[in-house]
Amino acid sequence: MGAHRWFPVAAAVSTLVVSLAGCGAGASGSDGAGSDGAGSDGAESEGTGGTPSRWSVSVIDPGPGAYEQCLEDPRVEEAFVSADYPASHMGVTLTADATADDAGRIADCLQQALPSAEVSVAGPGSG
């Protein structure tokens, strides 16, 4: 019976980890690659060929900190934190009309609020 109690938790964590796996793939920092927003139709989080069509910010090992003000930015569409404790990941998806500058601003805010975390940016053209 004990093994069955872990299944829903393991499934939820696995789903979250899979969701976060692409958040920082192939990018670190805000280098502005692909800042023209081409291919961003806003319909899905990935464009043709697996490249992201929206800007996103990934935080590894966020730890404790007052980062909530960073998520109140008008370009933040959704944000989530992993279910493990302490949290090991945070993912932030920006709105379809967000730019590289918007992603950089949010990443900088999160890096200042969570100085020990590893913050990365991914977006159109970075995949």
Image: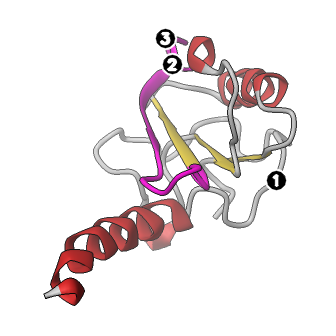
Residue at screen point 35% across, 38% down = 42
Q: Are the two marked residues, 3 and 2, in contact with CB atoms closer than 8 angstroms?
A: yes
Up-down relation of residue 13 to residue 31 (above or below): below
Stretch of the chain drawn in magenta: 71-89
**Label whose residue precedes the other's in the sequence (1 or 2):** 1
The residue pinned by badge 2 equals 75
- Crowding at mark 1 (Cα within 10 Å: few <14, some 14-19, many 20+): some
Which residue is under mark 1? 28
The alpha-carbon separation of the residues under discs 3 and 2 comes to: 4 Å
Nearest to the observer: residue 86 or residue 126: 86
Disc marking residue 116:
none
Q: Is residue 35 above or below residue 28?
A: above
Q: Quadrant of the C terminus?
A: bottom right
Left/right placement of residue 82 relative to residue 66 reads left
Q: Amino acid at mark 1?
A: Ser
Q: Amino acid at mark 3?
A: Pro
Q: Secondary structure at mark 3?
A: loop
Residue 105: % across, % down: 74, 21
Q: Label for residue 74?
A: 3
In depth, the one of 2 and 61 nearer the eye is 2
Q: CA distance from mark 1 to mark 3?
A: 23 Å
Q: Is residue 125 above or below residue 41?
A: below
Rendered location of residue 69, percent (x, y): 60, 11
Give me the residue at 37% from left, 41% from top: 41
- List x then y, in percent, for residue 120: 75, 48
Mark 2: which secondary structure?
loop
The residue at 69%/57% (across/down) is 126
Is residue 77 on the magenta stretch?
A: yes
Q: Which residue type carries mark 2?
A: Arg
